[in-house]
Image (tube, rainbow, N blue to C red):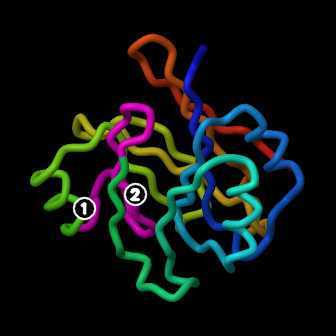
Amino acid sequence: MPFRIGIISDTHGLVRPEVALAFSRVDAIVHAGDVGGEHVLEALRAIAPVTFVEGNNDEASGEEIVRANIGGLRILLTHILPKPAKPAPRVVASLQKTPADVVIFGHSHMQFNARVGGVWYFNPASAGPRRFHLPVSVGLLEKRGRAWNAVHVTLI
């Protein structure tokens, strides 16, 4: 049976009912910041265990780094990267000290799933209030055998 991680970011206090459906078969959830309140985390914890980092709209700078190992996947979690082609020095330093399999981030509200300079970066986009023309989505990371794959799931 595959191991699945639901990836969400930038909820800004909004818990869409579509999230429960998208995350119905996940083993864990990772929130990449701008949570918008404990009620969001409580709703997600009703689905699966949650690992999160606060964002700049929470009570943090958005530059914090949280490390996790979920299902054997080494995760570096931060809210503000800002760009995979030019990550913040704090992210580069953290990766040099301790490698990660994937860097999960938010803040931009834009989907991203690619390897840049040998590092896998994933941004689920925003699951909160729609911003401009950007998609409202979450992500799913799935392990089958030894390989991890990621997809974006558009909510609306």
Please report contact status of discs 2 and 1: CB closer than 8 Å, yes or no.
Answer: no
Q: Which label's residue is closer to the chain start, 2 or 1?
A: 2
Residue 10 marker: none
Query: Residue placed at 51% from the left, 14% from the top?
Result: 144
Alpha carbon separation for disc pair 2 and 1: 9 Å
Please identify the quarter of the rendering in which residue 73 is found: top left
Within 10 Å of the Cα at label 1, are there few (<14), some (14-19), or many (20+) other Cα atoms?
A: many
| Amino acid tagged 2 | Leu
Within 10 Å of the Cα at label 2, are there few (<14), some (14-19), or many (20+) other Cα atoms?
A: many
Region rendered in magenta: 69-88
Please identify the quarter of the rendering in which residue 44 is found: bottom right
- Vertical arrangement, residue 21 with respect to residue 3, above or below: below
**Residue 102: x and y, percent?**
36, 41
Residue pointed to by mark 2? 77
Residue 70 drawn in magenta: yes
Which label sits in the foreground, 2 or 1?
A: 2
Please tell me whether mark 2 sits on a helix, a strand or a loop.
strand
Is 24 displayed left or right of 152 in the figure? right
Q: Seen from this angle, which residue lies furthest bottom?
A: 59
Please tell me whether mark 1 sits on a helix, a strand or a loop.
helix
Query: Residue placed at 37% from the left, 64% from the top?
Result: 81
Please identify the quarter of the rendering in which residue 110 is found: bottom right
Please name the predominant secondary structure of the magenta segment in the image: strand
Residue 87 drawn in magenta: yes
Query: Residue placed at 50% from the left, 74% from the top?
Result: 54
| Amino acid tagged 1 | Val
Residue pointed to by mark 1? 91
Looking at the picture, tell me which residue is in the foreground, 30 or 135.
Answer: 30
Q: Seen from this angle, which residue lies furthest left?
A: 97
**Residue 119: x and y, percent?**
28, 39
**Residue 49: x and y, percent?**
59, 50
- Vertical arrangement, residue 35 with respect to residue 123, above or below: below
